[in-house]
Image (cartoon, coloured by chain):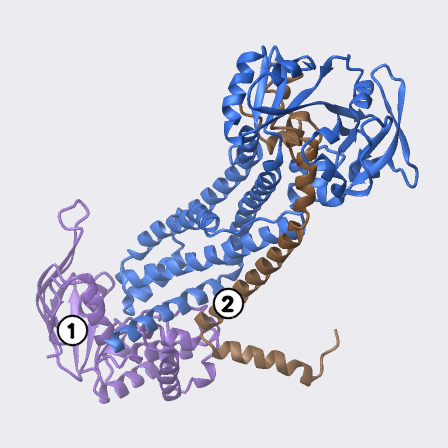
């Protein structure tokens, strides 16, 4: 299991008047090379679960092991270092910085790693060619189409060859054609050996044949139907 | 505005391509070096001007000692800014005990300290 | 180990690249901040350079000022001193020479200019024989010559002599006294002689209608310069109501005549303080949503809080460093090549006779560091604290819509 969660809970503002229990008793295992969809309405805790899997913060209680690393009690710095090497993120609305060029956006994860410019450009161009957007390398990201933005976001998630890809509502603001295109790329990545977790309530995603398992989350708990 | 022939544009285009190829830190370093070189040149020029002015020190010394001069002749509008070293402390208040400073140079040249 | 250092160096260069790109993306705002900052530093550096250059010039020339200058005081004001004091001074051991002078100010109502008129027996002064070397033309009037004066360059221009060698000044009773120009001071000595008119003692007494037996002050020279203070005390004890000014005192006046506590210096400092408060307030007034989003995205992509702080730090260093460089360069050009033209209104005020200032400020490491300490460091402090706050934006805020 590349991702193993056991009895994971997350409580925001614990002990205060505005305490919020986002997750309760989550048990989840994701095997290497598989694609899992986290399904549920907004506010169900999908993003929180994704954040824990993505080593953004540790759980309040329970065990979370991502790529053989226990997250609980891991200091923030080590979480960041682990996240750098292990997780590639694809955000809802992609969260590309529009003032930066496509090339600069893709290579953002490589800057704190001390990767020299020549190597950064080389790695980025390989991905840009793979996704057929080399001609956009020097364009400001704010000036490219939605489909191209989507591919830029995926390229950024792959730049450091991370084994795990997490996508948070990736098709929420895409049309049907682009949503289908996105899932095709995810399928290719899965076949290339990546482990993918997608949080989405889009049927185009959770009904896609490439999805190995769908996990329904409701009110912070896994709902077994 | 007439378009320049392409042979005139090519140095600019080449420079722009070079700038794009270089990392920003390197470009910044070059800019810094250019600014520091300019400052160095200015300082050197300033120093040679000072040396040239040094030749006049002999004349200034002769004037000071022969005439018993005590002050620089820069602000001649009021006696306490013309001769701050030898003016009496009352001079800035010559008009009135509580007189407010009305000479512009009084804001730059401080009143004489009481000896 | 070498690989780790190289990687660390490359990481810092990457962060510097990002900071430069970030400034370039917001170039209008960055340039505005840089210009304001540079203007403040220009103002402070110009003031510091002008005052230092003038202080240096004063220090260089005033080593030759009389060892003791003696004035008479009455009700806190200077008044004419009796010539008879000369005999009492001669009796004080250690005094080598006493030279009386009559000097004062002549206000030319036509030209609205103040001339400093000085009457003395130049041949009695030390180096008196050398005074001709300070002249551009002509010669000093002899001890018995009357109605002849040596004038400074600005007086020559103000009187618009144009080939004429004579001019007239009004006595207090409004009768005219005629003078012939016997020489002009060299423009090299402008900073001392620009407004100066030197004549014989008798001519000055006539012009100011000063009664015989009185002079303006005495220049006193001692046998042993180390005894100046002792002799000064003896003089003060021996003569009533006198003011004894020693050479060290006169030199000290020029060490403190310029300073940040002067009116203009305080205005410069206040302007700098106001500018910094505005800059700091702008920085501390919180992050824009775009900035928060950018930080959250960077954090999710694997940037540590320290990396984000480093970006903000480099941005501040670049802006403040460039502003410092630009401001100080502009200040140097302003002071050396434009003779502090922007400060002339306060440096010379309503003066009609203005010397050509040839200022040569010394640029010392200590002064540069002091300026940096008062400008760059407060700016860094004003930006680092909000930067720390910004760097604690939670990474998960990038997740979700």
- Few, some or many residues within 10 Å of mark 2 (<14, 14–19, 20+): few
Residue at (54%, 63%) from the top-left corner? B35
Q: In the structure shown, which secondary structural element does the residue marked by tag 2 occupy?
A: helix
Colour of chain B in the rendered structure image: brown
In the image, the chain rendered in blue is C
Q: Position of residue A64 (x, y in %)?
A: 11, 68
Q: Could you tell me how many numbered marks the image carries? A: 2
Residue placed under numbered mark 2 in the picture: B33
**Occupied quadrant, residue A41:** bottom left
Q: Is residue C120 above or below residue A45?
A: above
Q: Is residue B47 above or below residue B62?
A: below
Q: Position of residue B69 (x, y in %)?
A: 67, 32
Task: Say which chain tag 2 marks.
Answer: B
**Occupied quadrant, residue A152:** bottom left
Q: In the structure shown, which secondary structural element does the residue marked by tag 1 occupy?
A: strand
Asked if one can make out residue A113 in the rendered structure from this viewpoint, the answer is no
Q: Position of residue C144 (x, y in %)?
A: 83, 26
- Few, some or many residues within 10 Å of mark 1 (<14, 14–19, 20+): some
Asked if one can make out residue C326 in the rendered structure from this viewpoint, the answer is yes
Q: Nearer the viewer, residue A153 or B79?
A: B79
Residue at (18%, 66%) from the top-left corner? A78
How far apart marks 1 and 2 lie (CA) works out to 60 Å
Residue placed under numbered mark 1 in the picture: A215
Q: Nearer the viewer, residue C374 or C36?
A: C374
In the image, the chain rendered in purple is A
């Amino acid at each position: 299991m590349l991702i193993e969660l056991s009895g994971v809970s997350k409580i925001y503002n614990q002990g205060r008047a505005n305490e919020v229990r986002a997750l309760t008793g989550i048990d989840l295992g994701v095997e290497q090379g598989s694609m899992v969809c986290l399904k549920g309405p907004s506010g169900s805790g999908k993003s929180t679960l994704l954040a824990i899997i993505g080593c953004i913060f540790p759980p309040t209680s329970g065990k979370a092991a991502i790529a053989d690393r226990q997250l609980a009690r891991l200091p923030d710095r080590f979480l960041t270092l682990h996240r750098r090497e292990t997780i590639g993120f694809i955000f809802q609305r992609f969260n590309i910085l529009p003032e930066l060029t496509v090339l600069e956006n893709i290579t953002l994860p490589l800057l704190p790693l001390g990767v020299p410019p020549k190597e950064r450009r080389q790695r980025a161009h390989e991905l840009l060619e793979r996704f057929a957007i080399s001609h956009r390398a020097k364009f400001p990201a704010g000036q490219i189409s939605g489909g191209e933005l989507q591919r830029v976001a995926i390229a950024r998630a792959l730049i450091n060859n991370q084994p795990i890809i997490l996508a948070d509502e990736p098709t929420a603001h895409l049309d049907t054609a682009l949503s289908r295109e996105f899932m095709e790329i995810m399928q290719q990545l899965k076949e290339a050996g990546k482990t993918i977790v997608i949080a989405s309530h889009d049927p185009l995603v959770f009904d896609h044949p490439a999805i190995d398992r769908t996990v329904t989350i409701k009110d912070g708990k896994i709902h077994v139907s | 505005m007439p378009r320049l022939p392409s042979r005139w544009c090519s140095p600019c285009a080449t420079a722009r391509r070079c700038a794009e190829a270089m990392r920003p830190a390197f470009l910044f370093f070059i800019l810094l070096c250019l600014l520091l070189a300019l400052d160095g040149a200015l300082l050197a020029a300033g120093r040679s001007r000072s040396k040239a002015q040094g030749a006049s020190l002999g004349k200034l010394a002769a004037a000071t000692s022969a005439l018993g001069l005590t002050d620089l002749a820069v602000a001649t509008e009021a006696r306490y800014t013309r001769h701050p070293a030898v003016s009496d402390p009352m001079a800035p208040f010559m008009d009135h005990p509580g007189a407010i400073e009305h000479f512009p140079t009084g804001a730059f040249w401080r009143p004489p300290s009481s000896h | 180990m070498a690989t780790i250092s190289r990687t660390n160096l490359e990481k810092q260069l990457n962060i510097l690249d990002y900071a430069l790109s970030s400034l370039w993306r917001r170039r209008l705002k960055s340039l505005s901040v840089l210009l304001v900052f540079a203007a403040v530093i220009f103002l402070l550096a110009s003031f510091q350079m002008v005052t230092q250059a003038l202080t240096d010039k004063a220090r260089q020339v005033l080593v030759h000022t009389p060892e003791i200058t003696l004035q008479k005081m009455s009700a806190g004001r200077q008044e004419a001193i009796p010539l008879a004091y000369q005999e009492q001074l001669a009796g004080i051991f250690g005094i080598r020479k006493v030279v009386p002078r009559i000097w004062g100010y002549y206000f030319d109502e036509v030209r609205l200019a103040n001339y400093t008129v000085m009457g003395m027996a130049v041949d009695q002064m030390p180096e008196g024989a050398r005074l001709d070397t300070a002249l551009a033309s002509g010669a000093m009037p002899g001890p018995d010559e009357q109605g002849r004066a040596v004038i400074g360059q600005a007086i020559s221009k103000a009187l618009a002599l144009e080939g004429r060698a004579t001019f007239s000044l009004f006595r207090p009773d409004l009768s005219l006294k005629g003078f012939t120009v016997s020489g002009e001071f060299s423009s090299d000595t402008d900073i001392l002689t620009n407004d100066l008119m030197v004549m014989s003692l008798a001519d000055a007494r006539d012009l100011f209608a000063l009664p015989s037996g009185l002079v303006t002050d005495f220049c006193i020279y001692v046998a042993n310069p180390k005894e100046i203070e002792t002799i000064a005390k003896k003089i003060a004890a021996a003569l009533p109501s006198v003011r004894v000014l020693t050479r060290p005192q006169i030199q000290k006046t020029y060490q403190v005549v310029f300073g940040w506590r002067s009116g203009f210096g305080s205005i410069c400092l206040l302007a700098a303080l106001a500018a910094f408060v505005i800059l700091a307030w702008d920085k501390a007034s919180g992050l824009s949503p775009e900035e928060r989003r950018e930080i959250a995205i960077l954090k999710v992509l694997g940037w540590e809080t320290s990396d984000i702080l480093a970006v903000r730090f480099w941005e501040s260093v670049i802006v403040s460093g460039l502003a410092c460089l630009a401001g100080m360069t502009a200040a140097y050009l302003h002071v050396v090549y434009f003779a502090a033209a922007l400060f002339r209104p306060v440096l010379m005020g309503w003066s009609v006779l203005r010397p050509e200032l040839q200022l040569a400020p010394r640029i010392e490491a200590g002064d540069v560091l002091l300026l940096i300490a008062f400008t760059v460091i407060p700016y860094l402090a004003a930006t680092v604290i909000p930067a720390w706050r910004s760097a604690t934006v939670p990474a998960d805020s990038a997740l979700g819509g």
